[in-house]
């Protein structure tokens, strides 16, 4: 498997976070500024340029026991500082499936 | 049902112990994710958007009632109370915790269920006709041969590290319900002029990024030679299959690039080396497997019992019977398809309560047996016709009697972007909206047989290429866009659908399908001309004109 750090270039187009899935139970988590993981997007560390993104990702990759499959995901930061997912995929990861019925048990 | 022996039980139990140790070492950090990934995949464990996903095998689609209860138990205890039946006779649990997976596997092992051959670059769960052993006119029960191949390939080192995954399906009926032409190897049980049992062998079928319909590589391979012939195919694939490019690694690409003639020559040459080896199957081996399949002690029952005659006066019962009940090889019995496609719900999902209740109904009405079909429905294979009215009422109470089998709302859909880490677009909400649009049973019945297949990415788990109407979700500039094809089919006349035009947005898909259906209703020559026949007669153009005239 190619490590995310081996990707030739890490480019970000705007504010981003590093997200992954927690190893023991698989839930969606975000890398925090306190070098930990949180299930709450509002606690995620925000990076705004490629160097910051690469550094945060490197730190996340190093914590292989804590979470798996880390990657950089776009977010939107409101004027009030509120963080929202930057695309539909991340929105679904954050708020759950969009299909109702049995899936929202 | 098939009775597993001590070797099978030991293998499954040892596998659980092995995986428990691997999980323990992973959680302690002794194994990295890179080291662990292949091990979890070999046990059916994927990482999806929200959590780990656990895929459990249902070999050739046959389940005993106690096995279905065990699946319900896993859904309830370790997941969120439901499971999703897939297009390859597996069931998936979407929210399982890695730390609890060994316990879930152990609970399943107690009833002989496991997750081997459900992921990874190996020989996958061998699938078959969900009506195997009960369909009228069948050559013989194809599960006997499915089980033979399962035994031969499970954990076989030569088949465990293939260039890519490898799928086999078997049918023994003229009408192909196992979709053998879209498998890496498709096997059709036939008899030769000496009345010997053998197989027409097809190779190189598959969907995904580069879809192909399988080609016949040999018109007759004797049953005793089938393992050596499959092995010869696998050896040629193992030798020449592309390992440098995941998108070109499936056998269909190799068959296409070499050409079926050259590919078959390579296989023939390899086969001659191994044909008369220990791979040749003794009759006793087949008879031993055959003897482990048990069949019900059917009663002598009338073709038309009074209970059925009386129930025929109820139009709701008749609507269900017409689409859900199929002829059985034994007089007085029927095969009942249990729709997992209620209006507005995710296709293929069943709750733990439904699974438990269906297991009870299987005990009461179907000799304790349930089948799983690739269309994401279940079936009760041995229902006495006299019991059909009572069964219908019981299924209806459970939400399992939607009278839509083979109709437009009997949609096949992959999990899509709601669950899948590979998906680019959502599938299930599209299916849900379509079922609401065509919820009126009179309308659905008027339309007749029409299969819609939806995939949320080019990997095509929803088999969109072979849907009568196929819907493929892609992502374009951050937006979900859906490409629509018509004219595909997955049966004995399998064909790939043709694109009708530019992709449409999420909110437009149901309107487009309505336009296609309206065009069909206007264009068909007779009420019994099926959608597929109209498309074959007229081609894509009239449908394209209708859809894009105002777009």
Image (cartoon, coloured by chain):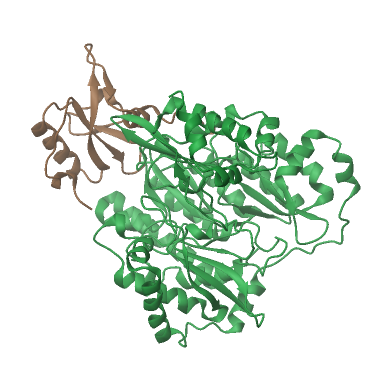
Quarter of the rendering occupied by the C terminus of chain B: top left
Q: How many marks?
A: 0
Relative to the observer, which residue lies in front, A51 or B342? B342
What percent of the width, then of the height, locates residue B387?
81, 48
Q: In the figure, B469 relative to B160: above or below? A: above
Quarter of the rendering occupied by the N terminus of chain B: bottom right
- Answer with the quarter of the image where residue B394 lies: top right
Chain painted in green in the figure = B
Chain A: colour as depicted: brown
Relative to the observer, which residue lies in front, B185 or B449? B449
What percent of the width, then of the height, locates residue B270?
38, 81
Q: Which residue is drawn at 12% across and 37% down?
A: A54
Q: Is residue B209 left or right of residue A7?
A: right
Q: Is residue B226 left or right of residue B210?
A: right
Relative to the observer, which residue lies in front, B185 or A100? B185
Q: Is residue B275 left or right of residue B526?
A: left
Toward the bottom, the furthest residue is B276
Q: In the figure, B448 relative to B505: above or below? A: below
Toward the right, the furthest residue is B306
What percent of the width, then of the height, locates residue B192?
62, 78
Residue A49 shows in this picture: yes
Q: Is residue B344 left or right of residue A65?
A: right
Residue B111 shows in this picture: no
């Amino acid at each position: 498997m190619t490590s995310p750090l081996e990707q030739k270039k890490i480019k970000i187009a705007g504010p981003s976070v590093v997200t992954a899935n927690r190893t023991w139970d698989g839930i969606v988590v975000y890398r925090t500024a306190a070098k930990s993981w949180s299930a709450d997007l509002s606690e995620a560390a925000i990076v705004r340029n490629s160097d910051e993104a690469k550094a945060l990702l490197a730190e996340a990759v190093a914590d292989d026991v804590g979470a798996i499959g880390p990657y950089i995901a776009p977010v939107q930061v409101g004027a009030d500082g509120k963080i929202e997912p930057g695309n539909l995929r991340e929105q679904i990861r954050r708020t759950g499936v969009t299909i109702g019925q049995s899936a929202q048990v | 049902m098939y009775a597993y022996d001590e070797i099978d039980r030991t293998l499954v139990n040892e596998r659980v112990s092995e995986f428990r140790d691997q999980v323990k070492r992973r959680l302690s950090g002794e194994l990295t994710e890179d080291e662990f990934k292949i091990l979890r995949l070999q046990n059916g464990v994927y990482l999806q958007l929200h959590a780990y996903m656990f895929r459990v095998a249902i070999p050739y689609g046959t389940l005993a009632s106690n096995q279905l209860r065990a699946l319900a138990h896993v859904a309830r205890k370790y997941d969120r109370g439901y499971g999703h039946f897939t297009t390859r006779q597996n069931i998936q649990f979407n929210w399982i915790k890695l730390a609890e997976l060994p316990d879930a596997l152990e609970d399943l092992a107690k009833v002989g269920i496991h997750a081997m051959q459900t992921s990874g670059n190996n020989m996958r769960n061998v699938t078959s006709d969900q009506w195997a052993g009960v369909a009228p006119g069948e050559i013989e029960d194809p599960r006997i041969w499915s089980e033979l191949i399962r035994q031969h390939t499970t954990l076989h080192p030569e088949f465990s590290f293939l260039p890519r995954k490898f799928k086999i399906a078997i049918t023994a009926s003229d009408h192909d319900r196992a979709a053998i032409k879209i498998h890496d190897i498709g096997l059709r049980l036939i008899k030769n002029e000496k009345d010997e049992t053998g197989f027409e062998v097809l190779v190189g079928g598959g969907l995904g990024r580069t879809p192909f319909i399988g080609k016949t590589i040999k018109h007759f391979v004797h049953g005793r030679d089938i393992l050596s012939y499959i092995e010869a195919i696998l050896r040629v694939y193992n030798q020449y299959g592309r390992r440098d490019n995941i998108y070109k690694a499936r056998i269909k690409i190799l068959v296409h690039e070499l050409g079926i003639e050259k590919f078959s020559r390579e296989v023939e040459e390899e086969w001659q080396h191994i044909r008369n080896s220990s791979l040749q199957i003794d009759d006793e081996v087949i008879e031993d497997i055959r003897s482990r399949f048990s069949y019900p002690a059917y009663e002598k029952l009338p073709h038309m019992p009074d209970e059925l005659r009386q129930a025929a006066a109820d139009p709701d019962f008749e609507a269900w019977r017409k689409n859900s009940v199929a002829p059985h090889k034994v007089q007085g019995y029927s095969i009942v398809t249990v729709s997992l496609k209620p209006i507005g719900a995710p296709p293929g999902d069943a709750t733990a309560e439904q699974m438990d209740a269906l297991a009870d109904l299987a005990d009461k009405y179907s000799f304790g047996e349930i089948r799983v079909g690739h269309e994401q429905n279940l079936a009760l294979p041995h229902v006495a016709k006299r019991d059909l009215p009572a069964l219908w009422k019981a299924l209806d109470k459970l939400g399992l009697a939607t009278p839509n089998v083979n109709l437009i709302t009997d949609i096949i859909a992959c999990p899509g972007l709601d669950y899948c880490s590979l998906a680019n677009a959502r599938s299930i909400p599209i299916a849900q909206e379509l079922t609401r649009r065509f919820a009126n049973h009179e309308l659905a019945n008027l339309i007749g047989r029409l299969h819609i297949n939806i995939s949320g990415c080019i990997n095509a788990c929803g088999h969109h290429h072979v849907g009568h109407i196929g819907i493929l979700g892609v992502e374009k500039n951050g937006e979900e866009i859906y490409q629509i094809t018509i004219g595909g089919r997955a049966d004995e006349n399998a064909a790939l659908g043709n694109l009708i035009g530019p992709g449409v947005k999420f909110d437009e898909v149901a309107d487009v399908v309505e336009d296609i259906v309206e065009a069909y209703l206007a264009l068909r020559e007779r009420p019994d001309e099926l959608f597929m026949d109209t498309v074959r007669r007229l081609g894509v153009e009239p449908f394209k004109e209708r859809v894009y005239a105002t777009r």
